[in-house]
Image: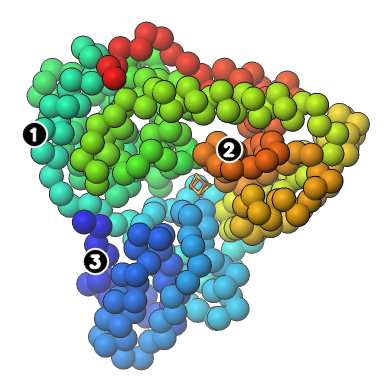
Amino acid sequence: LLRIDKEEVLTRVRSGGFKKILLQGPDGLRNQLVELANYLLENVGDIEVIIDGDRSFGGCDIPFHKASKIGVDAVFHFGHTEFPATEEQLSLVSKDIETVYFPVFEDSEVNRTLFRSLIRKLGGAKSVAVVYSIQYRNQYLEIVDKLRKEGITVYKPREFFRIEKWQVLGCNIGALNKVREKVDGVIVVGGGLFHAIGVGLYSGLPTILVDIPRGVVSNIEKEIIRFRSLIAYNIEKAKGVYRFGVIVSTKSFQFNYSVAKYIYNYINNELEKKGVMLVMDYIEPETIDYFPSIEAFIQTACPRISIDDISNYRKPILNIEQFLILIGKKRFEEVYPWKEPRLFRE
Ligand code: SF4
């Protein structure tokens, strides 16, 4: 079970001397924030606690604009680690508001049936990389240990960076690319397909998901192939388009105005087509549909909008990398590689 450690939060409130804080968390943790708010109010006394009621998608989506309006001392973000923001994004963050990250960890153990199922799927692979989404760090460490006892060579961290070295985000597969050539495939310890799809697509390696909350191990090869085809189709479709919408997001660390401006200029000047700039907070198919005169969109926010959600959009919606493929500055295989042989079993 994923549980917020209330005492850890209380200690941080006291050590920071905060008087007014904004709590933010992803869907699965939001209800726990109510309990946490009451706990802090009872134990600190002189404090104001406000909960962000909107959806939050990651460490890239810290609500600084709300925090400034309400006038809090700090934003407490639960469920993710700090996002590797760009200079441009950091320059817009108020220095008066502190951001404190509380990753939340699953504490269950990896049972024997789950691990044996993983060994079967590995299909004789001798060398693997193991990565994880932050909530499942404990299970990741356990799996690495067990794989080594089975005589399998495992690539795992020696050091930790701001993002822990072998942790993955939906848009960043960390140091995985450095060991691509050394391994037969990759194991993702996580919950749900999201991180595993990103790892499989961006690394090109055979990918197995150990889904801890569901207690299932799966080879996600078919999903990777399906997403690769959808992306390729979307890029091809956008090639024939004349009118583009270029979207810049106001979400804190999804804000890429300079890149959006570059794309906008490129469309108008180099491609000699028509581009128009749009600014949005939350990008979704219903909102996009209100622009029938625009034939395709380039969004500079979360790259996964143009992967996981593309079948929900009626028109092509490309991310930055896909735009670079469209204009010939990157090859498809460079962004979405593919490594043979594929040893993993169904
Ligand atoms: S994948 Fe999207 S939502 Fe997740 S961290 Fe990256 S930008 Fe944020």
Q: Which residue is mark 3?
A: 5
Question: Which one is in front, 49 or 318?
Answer: 318
Q: Which residue is mark 2?
A: 311
Rendered location of residue 227, percent (x, y): 51, 28
Report the disc number at residue 112. Answer: 1
Instruction: Identify the residue at horizontal 23%, vertical 14% (top origin).
Output: 123
Mark 2: which amino acid? Ser
Can you tell which of label 1 and label 2 is closer to the viewer?
Answer: 2
Q: Viewed as shown, does residue 86 lie left or right of 142?
A: right
Quadrant containing the C terminus in the rendered view:
top left
Q: Are marks 1 and 3 in contact (CB under 8 Å)?
A: no
Helix, strand or loop at disc 2? helix
Mark 3: which amino acid? Asp
Mark 1 or mark 3, earlier in chain: 3
Task: Specify few, some or many for label 3: CA neighbours under 10 Å numbering under 14, 14-19, or 20 or more.
Answer: few
Q: Is residue 87 visible?
A: no
Distance from the alpha carbon under mark 1 to that under mark 3:
28 Å
Image vertical order of residue 56 relative to residue 106, above or below: below
Rendered location of residue 288, percent (x, y): 71, 51
Question: Which one is in front, 232 or 311?
Answer: 311
Q: Viewed as shown, does residue 142 lie left or right of 226?
A: left
The colour style of the image is rainbow
Can you tell which of label 1 and label 3 is closer to the viewer?
Answer: 1
Mark 2 or mark 3, earlier in chain: 3
Quadrant containing the N terminus in the rendered view:
bottom left
Distance from the alpha carbon under mark 2 to that under mark 3:
38 Å
Report the disc number at residue 100. Answer: none
